[in-house]
Amino acid sequence: MIKNYPFNIIKNKFPLWIKRVLLFLTGVFLLVIMLYVVLGVYVNNNKTELQARLLKELNGGISGTLKVKSMDPTFFTGFPHVSLKLKQVILRDSLYAVHQRTFLKAGELDVKVNLMALLRGAIDIRKMSIRNAAIDLYTDASGYSNSAVFKKKKNADSKDKSEGSFPELRSLILDNVTLGIEDVKNGKSYSFTVHELDAEIGYTFSGWEAEANLDARAHSMAFNTVHGSFIKEKTLEGKFDLIYDEDEGFITALPNTLEIGGDAFVIGAKIRVGSEKADFTFTISNESILWSRASHLLSPNISSKLDMFAIDEPIAVTCDLIGDFNAEGDPSILVKAEVRDNVLHTPGGNVTDCNFSGVFTNHHVKEKGLSDANSAIKLYNFKGYYNGLPVNMKKTFILNLEKPIAVGDFSSQFEMTKLKGVVDEDLLAFASGTAEMNVDFKADIVNFMIARPYIKGKINVKDADITYVPRKMKFKDVSVLLDFTSEDLTISTISLTTAKSTINMDGYIKNFMNLYYTDPQKIILHWNVKSPSLNVAEFMHFLGSRGKAKAAIRKTDKGNFTKEMNEFFEKTNVDIHLNVDKLYYNKFLATAVKANVFLTDNGILLKDSGLNHAGGTLRLSGSMVQQGNRNKYKVQANVNNVDVNMFFHAFNNFGLETLKADNLRGRFSSDVNISGSVTNAGELVPKTIFGTVSFGLKNGKLLNFDPVRKVGKFAFPLRDMNTIEFANLKGSFDVAGEKITIKPMQINSSVLNMDVQGVYSLGKGTELYVDVPLRNPKNDEGITDKKELAKRRNRGIVVHLKAEDGDDGKVGIKLVGKNADGKK
């Protein structure tokens, strides 16, 4: 009674039909148990035969050898099917002895076989699990691949049915499997560690469909080993929905989310299989990823170029890869990015509030193939603020990533005061004004920096107040139009005013863009300068050495161009063609001024210059070398018929301490060839003049000149020596510092006649000889014959005087017996 207790409950408590169902199920269960027991006995007794049949089934689809060390059944693991565990499985192609690359080496390989097929004596594999394995797919330089281990599936009408075929799996599991693919012929290398892959496969009339879950790491995905790997050392985790169409020959991966390196991408793919070509297309997208993380998914030859930029906030990115796994070289790569309200960091500075659409492609010109040389980074509708300046670029490309070149357009409108972000105020200070830029540019990129840009377009500045600090020059209401051609720079009319001057200028620089980067010292700025009124004193800072712009040394900020501009101002030569209606300098006034002035980084060259002054004309040429506080000059001048009083007054008596403008009247002409020193303020340095001077004075007067009055007081106490008139006075002398050597000079005046020669010193060393005929010139006023006047001039007594330094430091006059020629 005790043993039948359960059945008694069933008999007493449940309806008859339930009792019968339970009894049936119990019978089936017992039958299955008995079947598995029988099957276990069968498998254990026929392990060798079953292993041989299984290997025959597997070997039927391969061209090579499949070796298994041992096989054991695991009945309940694959219930209701039977699982067979194969240990130490090795699969090699027929040419293993040549290349020594094992296609598959697995620690464990589990296969699940159909129970009913097994009872019929057949092997029907439904599931395969590969654990602790290495798959090595190798293609040598000749193009042979050890994947030839897999034979093509036999046609349905094949007469030979004995060899079997590679199984149509319903499930595939990979656990801790390394997968390596090396293609020596085409320079490709792929390497993955599959931590786990679980795929369920269903077969259709046209092929099969599969769902797979993947957890892996990509060690290498090098389409071109020269350029390096995509997604190097990145984790891969996600789901795949795969479809294979046998007629088309493609495996299609429907778009699904796959995490790559921790970032979620939507990936779709299409790959050709079973053909000599292995065409593929990958479409990858991410709506929010950091620029640096996206860049480092690409190969180093691409990421190294993209890394010249950085973007603060995540961006939207898509990438299309199109190629052939069996073809040499990179696939076609097309990366698109959308940047909105972001901060862009570049080697040349940062752009805030940045918006643009970006594209990378390695086939910029379709017919030029896939390469770095044909790669491009393209920016469209670029907008932002560069150091506070608004920036707009409709299209900007960086072409040829082997030797990068940037091309594009640039436009901006801004207040001049905003330039302090790119030019320091101790070089150029902007107080007001506006600027508008519209240029196209082309530039090399060296070490990720813009170099040798060529600019074409216009820059228009209006109503600007600018201070050029190193020269302490201030300009007001500056307006200028800069017109850049492909080679030259044209500067349209500049209007500017200073406190005392109004200037209009235009000019040009030939071959500007080339020389700026190859040999800036050869740059020549050709200026045409016109002015109704020009005060030279405002520009005297150009005489001195140029002050240093502190920012040129101090600043290293990205996007700051102070150093470059400072060097440009220092090295540029300026060829000025000057036309001035009225020119002022201290006491000097000139009209109708025309001059050619050439300015270098350390000097001034003056040529073909002329002006009207003091009722006469001046013609000047010369040069000046800047040497600190004192600047060396050379002057060649022709003075014609100027008012001598005004002339000496304007030039501050030429540094002479004795002879001054108040002592002179008449019309003066002179030829001057002298050198000397001038201060940064434009003052002549006394006692530094060297050279020769010849002069002529018509209708001249010498008023209250002390050296002559001293001679007159000694020799002619009864004559008026305060006012001496000269009909025509000529002479020449050499100047050497403080000493003036007067060449023999004959002075014929209304008061007396003199012959003068010797040295007059502004310091010590005066030795001046004066021969004075005592005959009164008024006695010969009625004689017009020149020869007769010459005979009469020295009749009578001639006094020989010598002016020389005295013990008291003053010049003294004494009577001597002969003149400097030794004549009595």
Image: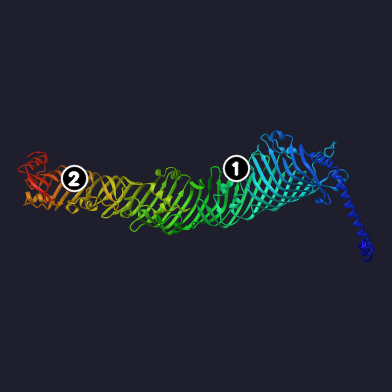
Asked if residue 30 lies left or right of residue 777, the reply is right
Asked if residue 210 lies left or right of residue 458, the reply is right
Spatial distance from mark 1 to mark 2, Cα to Cα? 81 Å
> Horizontal and vertical percent for residue 485?
47, 46
Asked if residue 287 lies left or right of residue 572, the reply is right
Residue 18 visible in the snapshot? no
Work out whether 390 lies above or below 63. Answer: below
Q: Which residue is nearer to you in this view: 105 or 149?
A: 105
**Which amino acid, mark 1?**
His
Work out whether 565 lies above or below 818. Answer: below
Q: Dot 1 corresponds to which residue? A: 227
Q: Dot 2 corresponds to which residue? A: 740
In the rendered image, the quadrant that contains the N terminus is bottom right
> Horizontal and vertical percent for residue 823?
8, 39
Please tell me in which quadrant of the rendered image residue 488 appears.
top left
Residue drawn at x 72%, y 41% is 104
SS at mark 2 in the image: strand
**Disc nearer the start of the sequence (1/2):** 1
Residue found at the very far front of the displayed protein: 2
Observer-side mark, 1 or 2, equals 1
Binning the other alpha carbons within 10 Å of mark 1 as few (below 14), some (14 to 19) or many (20 upward) gives: some
Q: Which residue is nearer to you in this view: 796 or 547?
A: 547
> Horizontal and vertical percent for residue 80?
84, 51
